[in-house]
Amino acid sequence: MKQVLELTLEEAKVMIEAAKQKAEEINVLETITVVDSGGYVIAMERMNGSRVTGPEIAMAKGFTAAGHKRSTHLFNKEPNGPVLPGNEAFGIQHMIPGKFATFVGGFPVVVDGEVIGGVGVSGGNGEQDTAVGTAALQALAEHVKDQNHEVITDADIKR
């Protein structure tokens, strides 16, 4: 049997608070979603004044990052992004309409080498969403450091 780590609501809240703090610091209104390894929402927060489309987009980014075990922007990264025309997964975003996001703002949560969830961020431009998403990952790393867990905090994550 394999033992697995699971994100808790407490950890998701830590991630969201850090993400909101970063969003406020860089002056962007975001929706932040943390999902479990199956892509189901653990916690979500939509900042006051943020776009009404943010929750659906942030959920899709988190779902995709957790389920496909890679940062969502890597799907379109030149030259071998799998959803680019002519590449192996061209059109995959149409297989699960409304739930599969292939643009910047989704990051898998990787702890001790295993994908245990995802974080999706929507509301800013690519650079802003990346800064907010990685702030969430960095907060989780800090939160679990006494437990000797390693959390990947880079933007370009592929497992």
Image: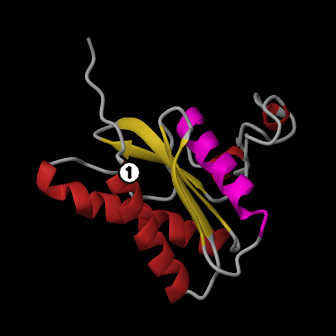
Element at badge 1?
A: helix
Q: Position of residue 113 (x, y in %)?
A: 33, 37
Q: Tell me if residue 58 is in the magenta stretch.
A: yes
**How many labels were placed on the picture?**
1
What scheme was used to colour the molecule? secondary structure
Which residue ends up furthest to the top in the rendered image?
1
Q: Tell me if residue 28 is in the magenta stretch.
A: no
Q: Position of residue 89 (x, y in %)?
A: 76, 30
Q: Residue 158 versus residue 118: which sits nearer the camera?
A: 118
| Left or right: 5 in relation to 118 | left
Q: Position of residue 6 (x, y in %)?
A: 34, 37
User: In what quadrant of the picture does the N terminus appear?
Assistant: top left
Identify which residue is drawn at 50% across, 59% down.
Answer: 155
Q: Residue 9 versus residue 112: which sits nearer the camera?
A: 9
**Which amino acid, mark 1?**
Leu
| Left or right: 66 in relation to 141 | right
Identify which residue is drawn at 73% across, 47% down.
Answer: 102
Identify which residue is drawn at 55% across, 86% down.
Answer: 26
| Left or right: 34 in relation to 151 | right
Q: Position of residue 87 (x, y in %)?
A: 79, 33
Magenta-colored span: 52-68
Q: Residue 44 versus residue 157: which sits nearer the camera?
A: 44
- Identify the residue under disc 1: 9
Identify which residue is drawn at 83% across, 36% down.
Answer: 97
Mark 1 neighbour density, 10 Å: few (under 14) some (14–19) many (20 or more): some
Q: Considering only vertical position in the picture, is 97 above or below 31?
A: above
Secondary structure, magenta segment, majority class: helix
Which quadrant of the figure has residue 53?
bottom right
